[in-house]
Image (spheres, grey):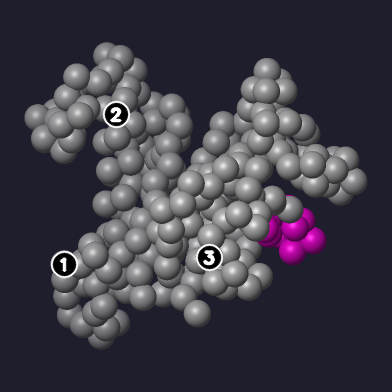
């Protein structure tokens, strides 16, 4: 149904992440225990949607378990490492496609925002639709001037889309403002590894209150591009 796999190479300090590959089919059987974990709105959903939710739930629980010691606030010398985690003190983000799911958690007193996103590499048809709709003029120019030798057009658009989704998720923890794709301008920074920086349009409220020099990470793996952005406290 789903199985744990190696995380994409987008690790951030103090962020605990778990990923899984969905190998579900319409014939997969859901146990009573799994059915009980489903929220009410998925009661009549297609089986694949239910499995995607369960895979995300699995990754979230695994991520919380991986960060048990730090997230529960216990010391390394403590005999028991299973004190309950106060979920109000944790921020989280989940992303899934039809074949891949990942979840990440971090302590709220260290980060004020977190966003992860995984996106299958777009095909030519999707790339053509998104090229002008989603990219800013500067991002299009950057592809031709800087990034053309490192990315195909399809990979570049997939990276821009995934990065903007991760940024929006991270900013949602700090603001409820609606942010459009063209309000965000991303620039890959290949000279420092697989990182990206970004700027926000003047219409975005409170953008000046964000920490300076924010950068996200990205990785191409499993036929997807994966991105993460965390916003630290000052």
Which one is earlier in the sequence, the residue at label 3 or at label 1?
1
Dot 1 crowding, Cα within 10 Å, few <14, some 14–19, many 20+: few
- Residue 200 location in percent, x, y? 64, 56
Q: CA distance from mark 1 to mark 2?
A: 26 Å
Q: Which is more foreground, mark 3 or mark 1?
A: 3
- Residue 8 location in percent, x, y? 53, 49
**Which residue is the site of mark 3?**
206
Marks 3,1: beta carbons within 8 A: no
Residue at 53%, 60% (x, y): give it.
205
Please state if 188 lies on the left or on the right of 215 as rendered: right
The label on residue 84 is: 1
Residue at 33%, 47% (x, y): give it.
59
Q: Toward the viewer: 212 or 156?
A: 212
Query: Can you tell which quarter of the image residue 223 is in?
Result: top right
Q: Residue lying furthest front in this view?
A: 203
Q: CA distance from mark 2 to mark 3?
A: 38 Å
The label on residue 51 is: 2
- Residue 161 location in percent, x, y? 61, 39
Task: Find the magenta span and give its range.
Answer: 188-199
Q: Secondary structure at mark 3?
A: loop
Residue 3, magenta (yes or no)? no
Residue 196, magenta (yes or no)? yes
Q: Toward the viewer: 92 or 171?
A: 171
Residue at 11%, 35% (x, y): give it.
36
Q: Toward the viewer: 12 or 139?
A: 139
The label on residue 18 is: none
- Residue 186 location in percent, x, y? 69, 51
Residue at 24%, 72% (x, y): give it.
72
Please state if 15 lies on the left or on the right of 206 as rendered: left
Dot 2 crowding, Cα within 10 Å, few <14, some 14–19, many 20+: many
């Amino acid at each position: 149904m789903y199985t744990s796999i190696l995380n994409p190479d987008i690790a951030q300090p103090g962020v605990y992440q778990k990923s899984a590959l969905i190998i579900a089919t319409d014939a997969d059987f859901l146990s009573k225990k799994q059915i009980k974990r489903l929220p009410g709105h998925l009661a009549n959903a297609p089986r694949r949607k239910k499995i995607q939710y369960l895979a995300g739930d699995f990754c979230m629980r695994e991520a919380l378990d991986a960060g048990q010691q730090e997230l529960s606030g216990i010391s390394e010398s403590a005999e028991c490492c299973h004190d309950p985690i106060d979920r109000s003190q944790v921020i989280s983000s989940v992303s899934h496609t039809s074949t891949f799911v990942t979840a990440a958690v971090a302590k709220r007193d260290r980060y004020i925002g977190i966003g992860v996103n995984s996106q299958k590499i777009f095909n030519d048809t999707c790339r053509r639709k998104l090229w002008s709709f989603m990219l800013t003029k500067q991002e299009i120019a950057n592809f031709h001037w800087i990034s053309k030798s490192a990315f195909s057009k399809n990979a570049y658009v997939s990276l821009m889309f995934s990065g903007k989704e991760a940024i929006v998720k991270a900013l949602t923890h700090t603001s409820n403002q609606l942010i459009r794709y063209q309000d965000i301008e991303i620039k890959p920074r290949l000279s420092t590894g697989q990182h990206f920086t970004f700027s926000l349009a003047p219409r975005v409220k409170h953008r000046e209150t964000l920490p300076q020099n924010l950068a996200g990470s990205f990785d191409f793996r499993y036929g997807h591009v994966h991105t993460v952005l965390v916003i630290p406290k000052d």
